[in-house]
Image (spheres, helix red, strand yellow):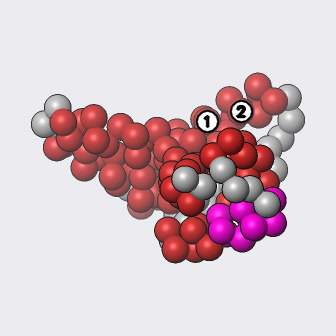
């Protein structure tokens, strides 16, 4: 079953079971998918759809601290629920230790020795962790190792 089919099935199930939050999130995900398809001019593959869903999840992840600072616990809780639902469609995230190991192996393979070569390392590294690790975390680990 493709990710597109899973979204469609989950939409139907959420309608039948009257799960308001899940229904809302799946509708938003499908809308984001449709917008991306219009922008790109073709039907998205599962990998491209994962990118779109990861972007939606990242928006919620980035918004949570801002709403916490503003004292909006109701919105924070809603965003956390939406994030949990979106993460069901994304591949499992790598742990920090797994990312650190991949970074170390990539640095050795590229032969980088200083922060000047960070771009070369990131170019080789990101295809390996795309969709499986947050780019900000990867960047921090690469920076700390290349110091």
Q: Nearer the viewer, residue 7 or 128?
A: 128
How busy is the neighbourhood of tag 1: few (under 14 within 10 Å), some, or many (20 plus)? some
- Judge whether 59 appears above or below 104 on screen: above
Q: Which residue is mark 2?
A: 36
| Snapshot quadrant of residue 38 | top right
Residue beneath the point at 57% across and 68% down: 100
- Judge whether 17 appears above or below 55 on screen: below
Is 21 placed left or right of 86 in the picture?
Answer: left
Residues drawn in magenta:
102-110
Q: Nearer the viewer, residue 55 or 3?
A: 55
> Disc 2 versus disc 1: distance between alpha carbons?
6 Å
Is 61 placed left or right of 95 in the picture?
Answer: left
Residue 5 visible in the snapshot: no
Farthest right residue in view? 42
| Location of residue 49 in the rendering, given as x and y in whole percent from the top left corner | 70, 48
Task: Specify whether residue 33 is painted magenta.
Answer: no
- Give the SS element for disc 1: helix
Q: Nearer the viewer, residue 119 or 22?
A: 119
| Location of residue 135 in the rendering, given as x and y in whole percent from the top left corner | 58, 49
Residue 69 visible in the snapshot: yes
| Snapshot quadrant of residue 63 | top left
Residue beneath the point at 20% across and 41% down: 68
Please identify the dominant SS of the magenta region. helix
Q: Nearer the viewer, residue 63 or 75?
A: 63
């Amino acid at each position: 079953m493709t990710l597109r089919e899973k979204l469609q099935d989950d939409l139907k199930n959420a309608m039948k079971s009257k799960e308001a939050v899940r229904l809302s999130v799946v509708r938003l995900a499908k809308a984001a998918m449709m917008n991306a398809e219009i922008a790109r001019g073709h039907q998205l593959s599962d990998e491209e759809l994962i990118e779109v869903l990861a972007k939606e999840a990242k928006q919620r992840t980035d918004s949570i601290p801002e709403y916490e600072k503003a004292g909006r616990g109701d919105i924070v809780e809603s965003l956390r629920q939406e994030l949990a639902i979106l993460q069901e469609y994304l591949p499992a995230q790598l742990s920090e230790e797994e990312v650190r190991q991949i970074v170390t192996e990539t640095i050795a393979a590229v032969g980088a020795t200083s922060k000047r070569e960070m771009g070369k390392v990131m170019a080789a590294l990101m295809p390996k962790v795309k969709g499986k690790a947050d780019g900000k975390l990867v960047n921090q680990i690469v920076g700390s190792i290349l110091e």
